[in-house]
Image (spheres, helix red, strand yellow):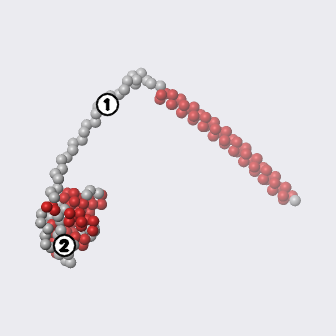
């Protein structure tokens, strides 16, 4: 029975201590928030009050336009005759059915034709995206290799 009394006295004492500590910290936090609120209110008032000479609007010069580089359109490569022999451009790593279709639409049907393209022409055919810009040179290198050695070489 004595153990039970000690347990309940300890429990009540623990609750009492927790309540006292919480009350102290809550009051302290409330005081800090009130002080911070007053400081912010004063700062807001100083920002809202117009200072002398700030009533008129500020006139800023118009931003200078950046020079625009003229780009020549890529000649349509599909206007020439279709060669009798077409290479399977999908053998090049990174060229799938979609890219092969774009190349064929632009008139590129063989590894030799693809190897003679410049990076800018290839980007114009494939469209500009981060992936295409990075792989364009690699595609042209592979096409040169296939044009020189053949697809199995």
* Label drawn at residue 152: none
Specify whether residue 119 is in view.
no
| Quadrant for the N terminus in the image | bottom right
Residue at 19% of width from left, 72% of height from top?
87
- Residue 15's x, y, as percent? 75, 49
The residue carrying pointer 2 sits among few (fewer than 14), some (14 to 19) or many (20 or more) residues within 10 Å by Cα, namely some
Q: Is residue 136 above or below residue 85?
A: above
Q: Residue furthest top?
A: 52
Q: Quadrant of residue 124?
A: bottom left
Asked whether, in this view, residue 128 is left or right of residue 19, the answer is left
Front: mark 2 or 1: 2
Determine which quarter of the picture holds residue 57: top left
How far apart are labels 2 and 1 at the CA level?
A: 60 Å
Q: Is residue 125 visible?
A: yes
- Which residue has dot 1 on it? 60
Density class for disc 1 (Cα within 10 Å; few <14, some 14-19, many ≥20) is few
Q: Secondary structure at mark 2?
A: loop
Q: Residue at x 19, y 58 (%)?
A: 121
Secondary element at image label 1: loop
Q: Which residue is mark 2?
A: 87
For the point 28% across and 36% down, the residue is 63
Residue 118 horizontal side relative to residue 51, left or right = left
């Amino acid at each position: 029975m004595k153990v039970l009394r000690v347990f309940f006295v300890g429990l009540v004492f623990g609750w009492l201590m927790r309540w006292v500590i919480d009350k102290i910290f809550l009051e302290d936090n409330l005081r800090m928030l009130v002080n911070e609120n007053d400081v912010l209110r004063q700062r807001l008032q100083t920002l809202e009050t117009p200072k002398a000479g700030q009533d008129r609007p500020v006139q800023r010069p118009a931003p200078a336009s950046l020079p625009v580089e003229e780009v020549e359109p890529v000649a349509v490569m599909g206007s020439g005759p279709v060669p009798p022999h077409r290479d399977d451009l999908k053998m090049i790593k990174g060229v799938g059915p979609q890219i092969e279709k774009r190349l064929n639409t632009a008139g590129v049907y063989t590894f030799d034709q693809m190897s003679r393209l410049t990076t800018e022409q290839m980007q114009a055919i494939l469209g500009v995206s981060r992936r295409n810009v990075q792989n364009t040179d690699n595609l042209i290198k592979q096409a040169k290799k296939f044009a020189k050695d053949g697809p199995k070489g």
